[in-house]
Amino acid sequence: MEYTEAFILVISFLIFLSLRVPIAYSIGLSALLTLIISMPFLPSVTTLAQRMATSLDSFALLAIPFFILAGQVMNRGGIAHRLIEFAKAIVGPLPGGLAFVNIIACMLFGAISGSAVAAASAIGGFMNPMMEKEGYDKSFSAAVNITSATTGLIIPPSNILIIYSLASGGVSIAALFLAGYVPGILIGLALMIVAGIYAYIKKYPTEKVVGFKMFMKRFIDALPSLLLLVVVIGGIVAGIFTATEASAVAVIYTFVLAFVYKEITVEDISTILLETTKTTAIVMLLIATSVAMSWVMSYENIPQEISTALLNISDNPVVILIIINLILLFVGVFMDMTPAVLIFTPIFLPIVTDIGIDPVHFGIIMIMNLCIGLCTPPVGSVLFVGCGVANLSIQKVIRPLLPLFIVMILVLVIVTYVPELSLWVPKLFGF
């Protein structure tokens, strides 16, 4: 390994971040500076530009703008309110019922929209005032909303799992989608346990038990939204359409649903498309620069040397996975999820496959690690959105976040060392 190149890559990237240069530009500039060490300036620039352009020439990546568009439609289309009412009918009467409603609604909305930020914004906007009115601590409500919103990145359909498939060189998207169900649900259950204990200690009020007739009404109201999961995932697993085609189906379905609910009008479409375009542009620039950096690292043999260094420490899978988890938890604190997946997948995937870890299982491990990072400062996007929706400073939310962080890490450890939790559903469907 050329230690000079690796040193320049890491140090320049950290310097750019410390100067508050946007992360996409920080990644691209640090990759360019590293490449200039090995080749003349003009070939370095043209090579990097070529790698950025070709990285976006992928049919699978078409799914991302479609799922983003579907998420934008759902954010405005009245789906969040119906999911909340359905969740209240299920768990509202339990101790800490509204906290459970927050978690379940975030899980459902996040899974349907594929966006943790959308879940934190949409569900938090409804649930935080409702919980505060019932006497719940405002910072606790925000903490529950922030952590549970990340489950939508593990429970499919998930844009980040599509990006991992790209970065891994073609791990089955359908297998990854199926692998996310059990870990995502386990995180939700773990958060509910903490929320239930907290609510019991604080003696928070519960919702009234709804009758069977009201329960069925709320279920029927929410059913069209829930069916999106069946249509998208069922279609992919059954081989009716690819993940990319499923994303287009999701857009059509959500538009039809939003118009049926009469929550959006034709005039709203331009705003929805504009927001989708902005988000897509940010994500695609991150993908382009991150893939370019991954290529530079490969060109400088950095992944191979890191692999050798880790395997020299130990060839025990338990130890290797502990080290990788710690690194990814640290990375998640300082780096957004998309570049982290694109940069570190080519580094760590060869290592874990050498010690017998299934690439699908490792994908879930990686996403779970980085989901925790979304809830932590200084770059936790879900943390910022959740605090913004609740109108709270980050400092006030950190304390109630801590026990929720602990159970998220506990579930991460369990999923890491019990691979069947991730793999048994894909195996059940022949993946």
Image (cartoon, rainbow, N blue to C red):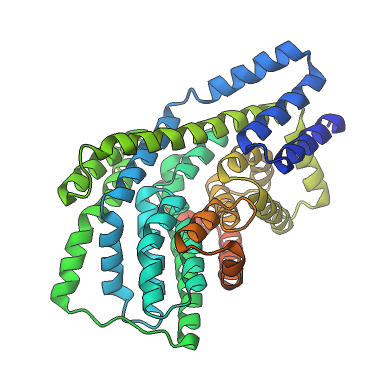
Whether residue 186 is visible, yes or no, is: no
The answer to which quarter of the image holds residue 337 is top right
Up/down of 166 relative to 413, above or below? above
Q: Image quarter for residue 66?
A: top left
Q: Is residue 89 above or below residue 315?
A: below
* Outermost left residue: 213
Residue at x 42%, y 27% (from the top left corner): 59
Q: Toward the viewer: 395 or 56?
A: 395
- Position in image of residue 365 (x %, y %): 58, 53
In the image shown, does 35 or 411 lie closer to the viewer?
35
Nearest the camera: 89 or 232? 89
Q: In the rendered image of this protein, does residue 105 appear above or below residue 352?
A: below
Q: Residue at x 61, y 61 (%)?
A: 417
Q: Which residue corresponds to the image point at 50% horizontal and 81% vertical from the top-left?
A: 198
In screen coordinates, is 40 left or right of 146?
Answer: right
Q: Position of residue 111 (x, y in %)?
A: 38, 53
Q: How many marks?
A: 0
Whole-percent x, y for residue 158 in the image: 43, 46
At a point 37% along the width and 79% down the height, the residue shown is 134
Is residue 359 something that shows in the picture?
yes
The N terminus is located in which quarter?
top right
Q: Nearer the viewer, residue 181 or 129?
A: 129
- Lateral position of residue 112 relative to residue 208, left or right: right
How far across and down, in percent of the image, does residue 425 sit?
A: 41, 55
Q: Quadrant of the C terminus?
A: top left
Residue 32 as seen in the image, left or right of residue 404: right
